[in-house]
Amino acid sequence: MCSGDDQNCPQFRQHRQELLEDLDSERRNFLKSAFVTGGGAAAAWVTGNTLMSPASAQVRPGQPTYHYLPATADTVHWGYFSKLLKPQLEVDSGDYITIEALTHHANDDAERMIKGDPGAESVFAWTKEKKGVNRRGAGPIDGKLLGRGAGEGFGVHICTGPVYIRGAEPGDILEVRIIDVKPRPCANPSYPGKSFGSNAAAWWGFHYKELLTEPKPREVCTIYEIDTSGQRNWAQAVYNFRWTPQTDPFGVVHKTIDYPGVPVDHSTVKENHGILKNVRIPIRPHFGVMGVAPKEADFVDSIPPGYFGGNMDNWRVGKGATMYYPIAVAGGLFSIGDSHASQGDSELCGTAIECSLTGTFQLVLHKKNALISSLAELNYPLLETQDEWVVHGFSFANYLEELGPKAQQEIYEKSSIDLALKDAFRKMRRFLMTTKGLTEDEAISLISIAVDFGVTQVVDGNWGIHAIIKKSLFAGASV
Amino acid sequence: MCSGDDQNCPQFRQHRQELLEDLDSERRNFLKSAFVTGGGAAAAWVTGNTLMSPASAQVRPGQPTYHYLPATADTVHWGYFSKLLKPQLEVDSGDYITIEALTHHANDDAERMIKGDPGAESVFAWTKEKKGVNRRGAGPIDGKLLGRGAGEGFGVHICTGPVYIRGAEPGDILEVRIIDVKPRPCANPSYPGKSFGSNAAAWWGFHYKELLTEPKPREVCTIYEIDTSGQRNWAQAVYNFRWTPQTDPFGVVHKTIDYPGVPVDHSTVKENHGILKNVRIPIRPHFGVMGVAPKEADFVDSIPPGYFGGNMDNWRVGKGATMYYPIAVAGGLFSIGDSHASQGDSELCGTAIECSLTGTFQLVLHKKNALISSLAELNYPLLETQDEWVVHGFSFANYLEELGPKAQQEIYEKSSIDLALKDAFRKMRRFLMTTKGLTEDEAISLISIAVDFGVTQVVDGNWGIHAIIKKSLFAGASV
C-alpha cells in the first residue's frame, strides 16, 4: 500500500496528506522541549504538489519540499564516505526525500537482483573495458596495493548521496525521520511480486574460524526472497551456494569475497535449493548504513561505524525510527546504503539479508545555537523509536581520531565487544545525566536495573553494543 | 490475586484447578515430540487436596504432589552450591513446589526487608555469639584467609534447597516450569502492601573504575519499593545511600560490600530521599540463581554461572518461563535464590533490584534413555519462554572443568564477553542443527539474520551472552 510516497498510487494525494498529518501529530514531547527546529518542518504542507521526476525538486519557500534521489551510477559512492563528495541534492531542513538504496550483494544473483533494473544495471555495469562505478572502497584508486580493484574494497557499501542540508554546520544535529521503507521489486519478469536479498557467510564473519563441517573454511551465500506486496511479513530462503573463485571482467580472480560487486558466474557454483524449508524469517527492513560525512579523513572506509553513524547495522533503524547525528562538515552530507531486509543483533556471519530498499525520510536540522537541551552535546548517533531510546557504543567512539593516522587499518585489529560495552555504558550514563537530569548514582542504578545492552554487530571493524532504555520509565514525570 | 498457590485465598481450590488446567493446555508441541516425560506430570490433578503446612508434603501415588519449602536458617545454603548438601525435600517428577527465596541484600535495609519476617529473621540472625547461617560462601569455613567471615563471601546468594528429584541421574534433564512468582510482602507493619529491594552499585560492577563524580570510588545502595498487590507493574526508588565502613556483630569492619548479609547501621549512612523522582521501573520478577548442583567440586562459589545454571541473571527466567538443566549428580539437587524484582541485560553495576520472591515451580524429570530428540545432549542451561528459545553462552561453558584446580579463582580474571559470544554462537548453532535438523550452512545464515545476541551479565565472574531465537520462525513447519 502507498504510504504517501508512491506517485503511481491512484490515491497518492490523499495518502500523502494522511502521512503529513500523522507526522505532525507524532512530533515528540522530547523535541518540543529539546529543540527549536530550524525552518517550519512541522508546518502543515498543503496537498496538490506535483511531484517532479527523480533527482529534481520542487521548491516551495517556507514549506517542506519533496525530493527523489534514485540510485544510479551517478548518484552513488561505493564503499566510502567523503567530505569531498559533490552533493547529489541540496535540501532545506524539514524537506522530505525518497532515496533508493542498492545492496552491494546484488551480483550474488544478478538474475534476481539486477536484471531489468536500469538503476542497478548502471551501478553494477562492468565490462572488460569499464565499470559503471569504478572506485569501490577508500583504498588506492589504482588498486595496486592488493590488486583487487579500484578502492581495493576497503569499504563495500553502495551509498546513495550525499545530500547537502542547507545551513548545516559542524556542531549542529541532523535528525533523520524514517517515514517509510519499501523493498525494491525485482525487475526481472520471471519473478513478479518478489524482492530478493543475499546473505553472505563470509571470511570476516565471527563464525569463520569456528566451522564444524568440511570444507573449511568456506564462504556461503544464501539467497532469500521477500514478498514485495507487503502481504507477508517474513522472508524465506530460496537456495544457497558456496563461493568459488570468481573472475571479474577485468580478469582478477577473487578466491574469497574480497571486492564488492564481483559478478557471480552461476555456472561455477552449485545451487542448493530446498534449504531452510518452512522457516519464516521475520522481516525487519532497515538501513545498515546511514549517516553523515566524517571530518577526519578525505576518504573513509564505509565499514567501521563511528560518531557520524555509517555502518551501524542496527536493525531498529527502520520505518518509524528517528536517528540523530552530530554534523561534522558543512552541509552534513547525508547518505544511506547497506539496506537489509532482516538482521539479528550481532550480524554474526558478516552480513544480513542484503536487499535493495527505498526509504522516505524527513531531514530536520537542529542548529547548535538553538539547541536548548543538553543534547546540544550529542557526539554519537542516537536512535529514537516509538518506545525506546537507543545509544550506540563502539569499541572506539571515534576511531578515526583515537587511533591516529593508521586508524583505518588498526580498527580491524583492535576491536572487542568489551570495549564497546564500556563505550555504550558511558554514553547511556551521559544520556541519563544530561537529558533526564539524573545524578551519576541515579543513572548507574537505573542502568543496571532497566537498561538492556545488546550486541549490535561484531563484523564491522569497529564493533558495536547498543543500550536500550524504554521511554515508559519516564512516563510518570508528566503525570 | 491468588494464582492457585496461596492457601489463604478463600477461592484457593478454584484457582488451583484453573492453574492446573492452564498447565495442561500449555504443554508445548516441542515437548510432545522431544520428550517422554517421567511420571504423569501432565495428568489431571483432582481438586480437593488439603495443603499441608510448609515444608511438608502430601503424597498421592501416581499424581503430582504439592510441596512448600520456606526459607529459614535451616533450609538455605548461603553463597555456594554443593553436591554434599542434604536435601531439604524429595520430590517426584511432575510435582509442584512453592519455594521462598530471600535476597542476600535484605540487611541493606533491615527495617524494610527483614523486620517482622520470621524466615528472614532466622536467616539473617547475627549476634556477637552466633549467626543464623554461619557459612556464607564456598571459601574456608574459618574465615581466616581474608578475615571476612565463614565462607569468606566467595559466593553471596542465599539459596533455598536443595530439592532432590527422585530418580534423577547424571545425564538426565531437569525441566523447571515457573508457574508463578510473587514478591515477598514486607512484614513490618509500617509498610503495608509493599515489598522492597536493594540495588547495590558495588566494587564488582562494570562501572566501578569508570566513575565521573567524587568521591571515587564509592559504593551506593538504592532501595526500591514495589507494590505487593500486583496493581502496579513498576518499581520506584525510595532513597539511596553511600556505603560506609560497617562493623559486623563479630567485630569485623567491612569497608566495602565484601561479605553478604552485613547489617547496615543506618546511623552511619546518609539516606538521600526524593531520588529518581517519577521514574517508573518496569518490573521483571525473576530468579537470578536457579539450577542444579555441579559435580566438579564439593563447594562451588554461587557467583559464576555455568552448565548447571546457577547465577545466570537472565531476567527472562520469570513467570511462564521454563528452564532445562543437565543433571550432574544424583537427585539433581535443585536450588533457587538471588531473586530480583527487575534487572536490565548486563546487570551493569553489579546487582539488580535484589528483592525476596516466592516462586511456584513444577519439576519434570526427563530420563536420558527416554529422550527421543537431540536435546538428549543438552549440556547447558536452556530457557524456553512462550515465544522464544534462549541459549546461554558464558566466557567458559564449564569453567570448573576448563580452568582446572584453580578455576574458582581464575574465572574472575579471565572472562570477557567476546568469549561468551563465541560460546553462545556455538550453542545456538548446535541447537539449530540438532533440534531443528539444519545443516551448518543453514544454521549460520539463520543466526546472522534472525538470532539476537544480548549481554546477560558482566558482573558474575563467568560473563554471559544469551542468544534468542523466536519460535515463530518455525511456525511454518507444521502448516
Image: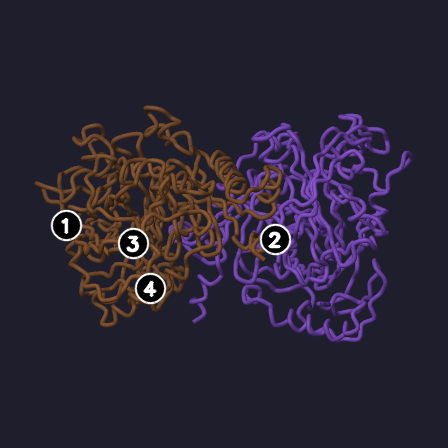
Chain colours: A purple, B brown
- Where, quadrant-wise, is the C terminus of chain A in this rendering? bottom left
Dot 3 surroundings within 10 Å: few (below 14), some, or many (20 or more)?
many
Tag 3, which chain?
A: B
Question: Residue A411 lies in what quarter of the image?
Answer: top right
Label 1 vs 4, first from the N-terminus: 4
What is the secondary structure assignment of the residue under circle 2? Answer: loop
Label 1 vs 3, first from the N-terminus: 1
Residue denoted by label 2: A280
Tag 1, which chain?
A: B
Give, as a three-letter code, the residue at label 3.
Cys
What is the secondary structure assignment of the residue under circle 3? Answer: strand
Tag 4, which chain?
A: B
Tag nearer the camera, 1 or 4 = 4
Tag nearer the camera, 3 or 2 = 2
Work out whether residue A158 or residue B446 is closer to the camera in this orientation and state it: B446
- Residue B11 position in % (x across, y down): 25, 72
Work out whether residue B385 or residue B204 is closer to the camera in this orientation and state it: B385
Work out whether residue A86 or residue B438 is closer to the camera in this orientation and state it: B438
Residue denoted by label 3: B355
Left or right: B74 in relation to A269: left
Give, as a three-letter code, the residue at label 2.
Arg
What is the secondary structure assignment of the residue under circle 4? Answer: helix
- Residue A101 position in % (x across, y down): 75, 51
The image's mark for residue B122 is: 1
